[in-house]
Image (cartoon, helix red, strand yellow):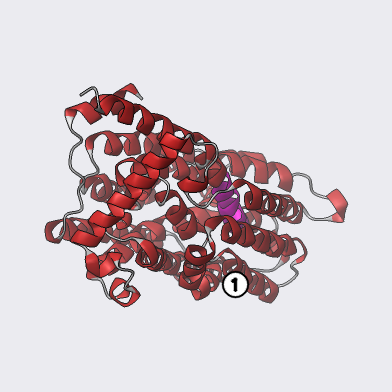
Amino acid sequence: MGAQAPSAAVERTAIKKVSVRLVPFVALMFFVNYLDRTAVSFAEPNGMGQDLALTAAQFGFASGIFFLGYIVLEVPSNMALHRFGARRWLARIMVTWGIVSLLFTWVSSSGQLYTLRFLLGVAEAGFFPGAILFLSQWVPSRHRTKILGLFYLAQPLTTVFGAPLAGWLIGRHGLFGLEGWRVMFLFVSLPAIVLGVVAWFYLIDKPADAKWLTPAERDWLTAELAAENARKTGHEGQHAKGDLKRAFTSGRVWTLAVVYFGFVYGLYALAFFLPTIINGFQEQYDTTFSVMDKAWITAIPYLPAAVVLFFWTRHATRHGTRTWHVAGPAVVGGLSIPLALYMGSPTATVAVITVTACAIFAALPVFWSVPSRFLTGAAAAAGIALINTAGNIAGFASSYITGWLKDWTGAYYVPLYLVGFFMLLSAVLMIRLATRHRTDEPTPDPERRTMEALR
């Protein structure tokens, strides 16, 4: 017992330092990343749609073509990150997408919008799976859900803070002779370039090189991660040996890809069309909202989602990640999103959408702790990128199909029913995967649970 105490103390301080030193910075990168890719959703109902004469289908296509660009370089980008290191590659990605995002300030036609959205996807390719892979290489699996949960907080908080920021920037109409939505694109793009330069000097590729860790902490992290990779090699050698062909033909990887498809389909249907749906409240309920009113209403579902995400991932970390940590929220989200169609007021509609947002964001960081349990090395880079590629396909599909169905049917009923279907499919596949493979983590022993509780 006494021999274990120093190890427990080193573990506690090492994980705390990683949580404080790396996670907030990578989360800030993710914040800017998500804001830049969804800024078009704030621009469309606030002048861009009218200035460029966009239909709902055209806007959906412009939103979704980003993901086609992303898919083109998704896996190669993550393999390059594995080869060259996260510091160089993530910094390069940020500067590149910041430059492309800046060009949206001067877009003047739907064709230019399509081109820039595609190029933005190409520029951002590999950032998200690269960030997941990077953080997964810094902590053992038993801490991964907690770390990824802290990282994932950036996504809902992007809308909580980003929507009012976008609304405020749009309100600066006339600055530099630009329409408000162009001002917004100008100022949300610059942080990516700045952060990319800072990341080059700030990030560190592996624990062994971290001078801000003590020698004991560096040794403990390095030994724990090496032992974990060795166990994967022993139990799942076909993946851990870095056999990319087998990683790409793994039924488990492809099942997780489809599960992720369902969640991301719902995520981006909300991200890109919620501001437009809220804008439609004015005619539907005979009311009027200012630009800032619409921005604040858009932000409402995401603050509770951030809170639920935080506590859900902490529960999974303390008690062991279970299948229902992913499948349960998928069921709640799948049933709640169509229910929003039948609410009789903006308040009730936003309340139900809030439940859906909470469900999606609760599940996502827990989901991402699953692939790294059986993938390591180059196979992990390829497998995680492949799963995220499925998400990007969902991003394109949900954006384009939602807009096309809205134009075809004249309402959002069919599109949101489709969101519900895909999320329920994710729940079914996650449960099926659990019956065929061990996807649950063992419940922490009493001593570890006590240690976690004291943190």
The spot of residue 58 in percent (x, y) is 58, 71
Q: Is residue 6 above or below residue 391?
A: above
Which quadrant of the figure contains the N terminus?
Answer: top left
The main secondary structure of the magenta stretch is helix
Q: Residue at x 29, y 42 (%)?
A: 142
Is residue 416 magenta-colored? no
Task: Kindly identify the amino acid type of the residue bearing the numbered disc 1.
Answer: Phe
In which quadrant will I find the C terminus? top left
Viewer-closest of 241 and 349: 241
State whether residue 428 is above or below residue 451. Answer: below
Magenta residues, start to end: 28-41
Q: Say whether residue 325 is left or right of residue 282.
A: left
On the question of residue 344 being in view, the answer is: no
User: Residue 316 appears in which quarter of the rendering?
Assistant: top left
Task: Judge by depth and name the residue closer to the eye, 260 or 145.
Answer: 145
**Category of crowding for the residue at label 1, using alpha-carbon neighbours closer than 10 angstroms: few (below 14), some (14–19), many (at least 20):** many
Location of residue 290 in the rendering, given as x and y in whole percent from the top left corner:
66, 41
Find residue 256 and report its image quarter: bottom left
Q: Which residue is mark 1?
A: 118
Residue 296 can be seen, yes or no = yes
Residue 314 vs 194, above or below: the answer is above
Q: Is residue 37 magenta?
A: yes
Q: Secondary structure at mark 1?
A: helix
Q: Nearer the viewer, residue 230 or 73?
A: 230
Residue 105 point in image, percent of width and height:
75, 60
**Looking at the image, is 125 positioned above or below residue 290?**
below
**Residue at horizontal 40%, vertical 63%?**
415
Which percent across, then down, holds residue 193?
A: 70, 54
User: Which residue extends farthest left?
Assistant: 435
- Left-right relation of 99 to 270: right
